[in-house]
Image: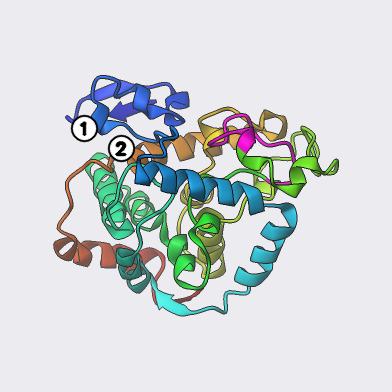
Amino acid sequence: MKFRNPDNTITLMDPSLLLRPEQVYKDKPLECFRDYSVNDEDPIKERVRRTYYTMHTHMTVDFVKSKMEKWLKFNHFRSSVKDALVKLNELVDESDPDTELPNIVHAFQTAERIREDYPDDDWFQLIGLIHDLGKVMAFYDEPQWCVVGDTFPVGCKWGENIVYGDDSFLDNPDTYDEKYNTELGMYREKCGIENLLMSWGHDEYLYRVLKHNNAKFPEEGLQMIRFHSFYPWHAGGDYSQFVTEKDEKIRQAVLKFNQYDLYTKSAGVPDIEALWPYYEGLIEKYIPGVLEW
């Protein structure tokens, strides 16, 4: 896997470093990413820790099913993609240790770096722009802990590479439920990651919104959206008991995307107003009009 450094040079990188990419920047501490170390005196680190511990306490099979029942009726609001993106200007992700910028800035940073490297793949550029749009749930009475952050399957043993590890799941009732706390849990071996019940969050929600509204993205792009936060699998190698040959293709697509999601966060703030006309054209091409959310 290739990794673009902040100075625009290219480094070959082990995908596992996506879990702790601060190792890439060991000589550049200001450029560290995904540093989830505990520090009670650092308000950002404490905010991140609190967000994940709350998530891991409440994210049960029953909870996820209740959120799917609530949100997959697509009857909460109607909005164009552009208006939803503008709404993200009011959101700072409480699970993100890397940036305090509004999410819309990160959206354009990601899209523009993809555009630089893949000038002919306009669908990929748009995936970069909209990949976090599912976070609009946070404006509709959802706490951020069930909107943002890394994802993982519920209904089976927690993966070893989930942020903050087993300690964060001590108060989750599924941890002690024999239906759910084994390697396979409620699934069968080699069932495929698409058949896992993922923790509820912005990835799965946006994937479902795009499918519901007949977005014209290739399947590769939709899978980038759906699994881009599933770090315990695509970067950590957890949940191999469920993986099929098809899943490896999905994993490669997600890794292709995620280098742009992560390593653009230290980039300069783009001129969003100047960029809107270009991306409005892409929105009109791939996911036009007013969507049901």
Q: Amino acid at mark 2?
A: Tyr
Say whether residue 164 is magenta.
Answer: yes
Residue 66 occupies quadrant: bottom right
Give the camera-side residue of 179 and 293: 179
Element under label 2? helix
Quadrant of the image for the N terminus? top left
Q: Which residues are magenta?
A: 154-167
Tell me residue 13's x, y (percent): 37, 22
- Give the farthest residue toward the right: 178
- Give the farthest residue toward the front: 41
Tell me residue 28's x, y (percent): 23, 25
Mark yes or no: residue 228 visible: no
Mark yes or no: residue 6 visible: yes
Q: Are marks 2 and 1 in contact (CB under 8 Å)?
A: yes
Q: Circle 1 is placed at which residue position?
A: 6
Q: Amino acid at mark 1?
A: Pro
Looking at the image, which residue is at 74% across and 34% down? Answer: 190
Say whether residue 269 is magenta.
Answer: no
Q: Circle 2 is placed at which residue position?
A: 263
Q: Earlier in the sequence, mark 2 or mark 1?
A: 1
Looking at the image, which residue is at 43% across and 31% down? Answer: 18
Element under label 1? loop
